[in-house]
Amino acid sequence: MNYFRNIWYNLLAIKNNIILNILLIGNIFYPSYFNNKIIKYKNIGDNYYKFIFLLNFNDKIKKKYNIDVIDIGLNLYNNFNRITTNCNSSNSSNNSDISDISDFSDISDFSD
């Protein structure tokens, strides 16, 4: 499955580079029309390279330490969102929200 994600993001990056090169050539003839589109596609391309780097980083750590960094990050993000939405409501107490953080007992399994 990881190979398919790597191939997918690499193909998206290649496609985006082709589009960016076409826009750069068009910018030679009509600079005022292509400026915003070049910036938009450049930002999209940078995001693809960030995803590719993150997937490669995750694969290396998964092979060496058997830890899925993306899964840990998503769990932390979901818990943070749940805590912040509970803190914003008037019926929740801070002690119960902070005690929910102690559910990370799975992290101790990685120390072996």
Image (tube, helix red, strand yellow):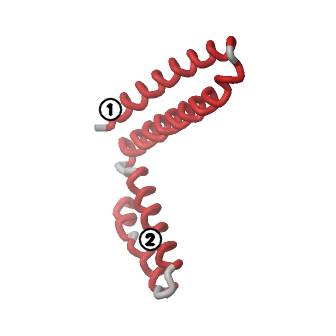
Q: Quadrant of the C terminus?
A: bottom left
Residue at image point 37% right, 30% down? 8
Residue at image point 42% right, 77% down? 100
Between residues 29 and 101, which one lies in front from this camera angle?
A: 29
In the rendered image, residue 66, in percent from the top left (x then y), is placed at 35, 49
Q: Is residue 81 above or below residue 19?
A: below
Query: In the picture, residue 107 is in which quadrant?
Result: bottom left
Between residues 95 and 12, which one lies in front from this camera angle?
A: 12
Give the amino acid type for the residue marked by disc 2 in the picture: Arg
Residue at image point 50% right, 25% down? 16
Residue for badge 1: 3
Query: In the picture, residue 26 is in which quadrant?
Result: top right
Q: Earlier in the sequence, mark 2 or mark 1?
A: 1
Between residues 100 and 37, which one lies in front from this camera angle?
A: 37
In the rendered image, residue 29, in percent from the top left (x then y), is placed at 68, 11
Count neighbours of disc 2 (C-alpha within 10 A) and say few if under 14, some if 14 to 19, many if 20 or more.
Answer: few
The secondary structure type at the circle numbered 1 is: helix
The secondary structure type at the circle numbered 2 is: helix
Count neighbours of disc 1 (C-alpha within 10 A) and say few if under 14, some if 14 to 19, many if 20 or more.
Answer: few
Give the amino acid type for the residue marked by disc 1 in the picture: Tyr
Between residues 39 and 56, which one lies in front from this camera angle?
A: 39
Q: Nearer the viewer, mark 2 or mark 1?
A: 2
Q: Is residue 20 above or below residue 84?
A: above
Q: Which mark is residue 82?
A: 2
In the rendered image, residue 91, in percent from the top left (x then y), is placed at 47, 88
Left or right, 65 with respect to 33, comes to: left
In the rendered image, residue 72, in percent from the top left (x then y), is placed at 41, 57
